[in-house]
Image: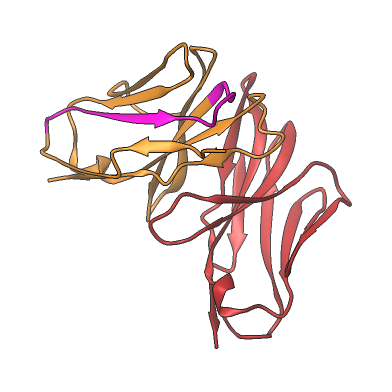
């Protein structure tokens, strides 16, 4: 079956702009989580959506937001981009929302802010 | 504060030289411990989930074990294709919500 699909794979934006990233989970999976990965901080949890509701949120500023649609696809938005937002953004899906069968990650979107 | 610490940060081995990676954690409400493998430019690939102390799981040359405070990923007779960053994560209940907390990873290089 198809894995987790993230688009676009690469993105270059200018400081101050906003960006929207997309994640399509494995068919049938209802939970989608977003993570930011940087060399200095590693993988950090952004938020999790389950059945169109934000269930958990990490310690990121309000510039980072997300949503989930009825087909479980999720989008993540970052407004007023800063240089420090340059990172690999990963999404992960799981079937039950508890990750008991392991969270499956996409290949990520590499965002570069210049 | 909930924390996951992996050691060593980097490990270089010769092909066939067995070793272990460590993941120690201090979290409350542990719901599971995960091991992932990540290749450059790709997302983490799921390897194992462990739930309780004493549990062990194996997959090819990899074996994961769990105690109350740490987990080990044992690599037996590794091959160059085992080179990757290995990530440990714990699923914890924090302020009533579940989330994955990741360690910084161990960058493993296997020389032929």
Tell me, yes or no, whether the highlighted magenta stretch contains residue A24.
yes
Q: Is residue B48 visible?
A: yes
Q: Is residue B22 above or below residue B89?
A: below
Q: Is residue A4 magenta?
A: no
Where residue A86 sits, quadrant-wise, is top left
Q: Classify B109 as above or below B84.
A: below
| Residue B11 in sight here | no
Give the percent coordinates (x, y) of residue B24.
Answer: 68, 54
Q: Is residue A109 above or below residue B16?
A: above
Q: Residue A81 versus residue B16: which sits nearer the camera?
A: B16
Chain whose colour in the figure is orange = A
Q: Which quarter of the rendered picture does the N terminus of chain B lie within? A: top right
Quarter holding residue B106: bottom right
Q: Is residue A55 above or below residue B86?
A: above
Q: Is residue B1 left or right of residue A39?
A: right
**Residue at (60% x, 38% y) in the render:** A103
Q: Farthest residue to the front: give it.
A: A1
Q: In this figure, which colouring scheme has been used for the structure?
A: by chain
Compared across the picture, whether B101 is left or right of B18 comes to left
Of the pair B78 and B34, the residue shown nearer to us: B78
The residue depicted at 65 percent of the width and 42 percent of the height is B90
The span picked out in magenta is: A16-31
Identity of the residue drawn at 77% across and 50% down: B69
Choose between B54 and A7: the one closer to the eye: A7
Instruction: Look at 42% across and 14% down and name the residue there.
Output: A69
Give the colour in which the image draws chain B. Answer: red
Residue A18 percent across, percent down from the top left: 18, 27
Q: Please identify the residue farthest to the right as the structure is shown.
A: B54
């Amino acid at each position: 079956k198809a894995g987790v699909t993230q688009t676009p794979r690469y993105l270059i934006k200018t400081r101050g702009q906003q960006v929207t990233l997309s994640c399509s989970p494995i068919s049938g999976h209802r939970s989608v989580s977003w993570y930011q990965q940087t060399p200095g901080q590693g993988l950090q949890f952004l938020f999790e959506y389950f059945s169109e509701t934000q269930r958990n949120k990490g310690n990121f500023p309000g510039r980072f937001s997300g949503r989930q649609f009825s087909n479980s696809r999720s989008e993540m938005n970052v407004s007023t981009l800063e240089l420090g937002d340059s990172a690999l953004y990963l999404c992960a899906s799981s079937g039950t929302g508890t990750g008991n069968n392991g969270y499956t990650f996409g290949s990520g979107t590499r965002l570069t802010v210049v | 504060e909930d924390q996951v610490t992996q050691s060593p940060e980097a490990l270089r081995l010769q092909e066939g030289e067995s070793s272990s990676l460590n993941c120690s954690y201090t979290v409350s409400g542990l719901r599971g411990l995960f091991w992932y493998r990540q290749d450059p430019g790709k997302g983490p690939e799921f390897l194992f989930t462990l739930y309780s102390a004493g549990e062990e799981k194996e997959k090819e040359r990899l074996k994961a074990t769990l105690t109350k405070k740490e987990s080990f990923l044992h690599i037996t007779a590794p091959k160059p294709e085992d080179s990757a960053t290995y990530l440990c994560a714990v699923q914890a209940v924090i302020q009533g919500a579940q989330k994955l907390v990741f360690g910084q990873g161990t960058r493993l290089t296997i020389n032929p």
